[in-house]
Amino acid sequence: MASFDLSTAQDVFGLRRSAQQAAAALSLDRQDQVRLATALSELGRDRLGCRGLEVSFDLEPASPSTCLVVTFAWRDGPPPARETLDLAAKLVRVGFEPGAPISRIVVTQPLPAEGLRTAERRNRLAGALKDVARSTETDDLRAQTRDLIATLEETRAQREELRRLNEELEETNQGVLALYSELTQELETTNSGVLALHSELEDKRRQLQEASEAKTRFWTNISHELRTPVNSVVALSALLLAPGSRPLSDEQREQVELIGSSGHTLLSLVGDLLDVAKAEAGHLDVHPQPVDLRLLVAHLSGILLSGHGHDQVTLVTPDLEQLPALVTDETLLVRILRNLLSNALKFTERGEVRLDVALDAEPAAPAVLFTVTDTGIGIPAGELDRVFEAFYQVRGPHQSKRPGTGLGLPYARTLAELLGGSLTLSSAAGVGTRVRLRLPDLGHQRTERPETEEETGNREGRP
């Protein structure tokens, strides 16, 4: 685009001036202008004396930005000094291309992205190179001095800016340290509060555990203390009604029968309390054995039909032609079903109470499902979560006719869980209630349990 011959030191001074004006016209900052001018003047001085030495300026579109390309070309002469190339390479991008007959040094300076077209930049470059005035060595030294002063000023300004930034960073660090200290102190305070709360909760847990144990001991002791006098009441009422006793009037007989019935009820309640206390304390033992469900259902039907006293309520029990196999504690199972059925009969004025027995469909865990369904008053939705609380009773007008202790469902669930099963309930007010008892076959569980080494040795006769 523009070329100059370099043959004298005066031409090198002019090259420096041309480089500065070209760089300024192409919007390079002050430091890049000085770097480019210094690199070109050093390379020009190194190449003085070479035949046909010529320097040219041009623009080369490249990605990501256009570059100013300055090329030194000569025909004969020694290669450039390594020190000169290294110095120039610290300031700009330099490439040496030796060749015969022409060798080249190519200097490349990327230009800032200003959105200008290459043609407009070429016009700026041509105008800057055209207006370059001839300079002397004195002018060049003055220019170098001005450049050095400007560079020193920029360095001083940068140093001041760096000092200011360091001060701001130090203040920021102090603020961060203060915030960290404050957060650490707050965290320690919070941890202390958490530890205190944890200690308080542990004390509360221990107190609740002690209260539960005290309640269990109370139930156990009071149940034993009550059982003896209640047994005496039941026995004495039976003696008064015995055939060999002194004759009683009809009214007296009715009163003695009422005493005996109340005694049996109280004795049953005391037994339930004692069982609940034993179950919570882990002292209620389970004795699994094969259960004849046909006899069990017949036994329950006989007890409940003779005592429920509702002519408008039908108790429906299953006809177990194909008996499901079940190994469990028969005594505890009878107590569970008796509580569920008597509860259903108690709160059903008309309709039916039905007991269904079926095998659980889950093959991996053999179990039997007992379902008690009634058409009674049902339980409101808001009370369903509380019916399994000990001594809790659903409030309503029905309570005056059907007094109770609120132990039936909690007692039944406790025994069901003790047998490894579960007890669930669903109900709707005015529609009825369904209670489902699922009991696993404890005999199957014992069969599936792997033998211990001692049991294997006993079975094989090893000592």
Image (tube, rainbow, N blue to C red):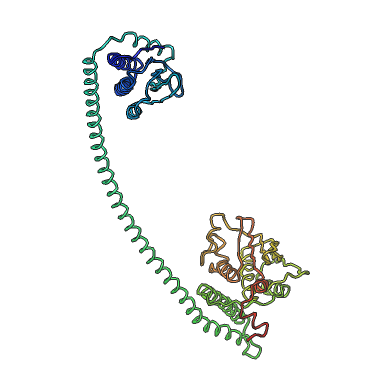
Which residue occupies 64% across, 60% down? Answer: 434
Image quadrant where one finds the C terminus: bottom right
Query: Hey, which residue is sitting farthest bottom in the picture?
Result: 244
Q: Is residue 39 at all visible to an observer of this figure?
A: yes
Please name whichever residue, 428 or 263, is drawn nearer the observer in this view of the structure.
Answer: 428
Q: Report the number of numbered marks.
A: 0
In this rendering, position of residue 140 left or right of residue 452: left
Which residue occupies 39% across, 18% down? Answer: 74
In the figure, 23 relative to 228: above or below?
above
Please name whichever residue, 205 or 139, is drawn nearer the observer in this view of the structure.
Answer: 139
Q: Position of residue 418 (x, y in %)?
A: 58, 71
Please name whichever residue, 243 or 43, is drawn nearer the observer in this view of the structure.
Answer: 43
Q: Position of residue 448 (x, y in %)?
A: 66, 71
Image quadrant where one finds the N terminus: top left
Q: Position of residue 403 (x, y in %)?
A: 55, 67
Q: Quadrant of residue 111?
A: top left
Q: Position of residue 62 (x, y in %)?
A: 46, 21
Q: Quadrant of residue 371?
A: bottom right
In the figure, 462 relative to 295: above or below?
below
Please name whichever residue, 226 or 216, is drawn nearer the observer in this view of the structure.
Answer: 216
Q: Quadrant of residue 428?
A: bottom right
Which residue occupies 27% across, 10% down? Answer: 134
Q: Is residue 70 at all visible to an observer of this figure?
A: no
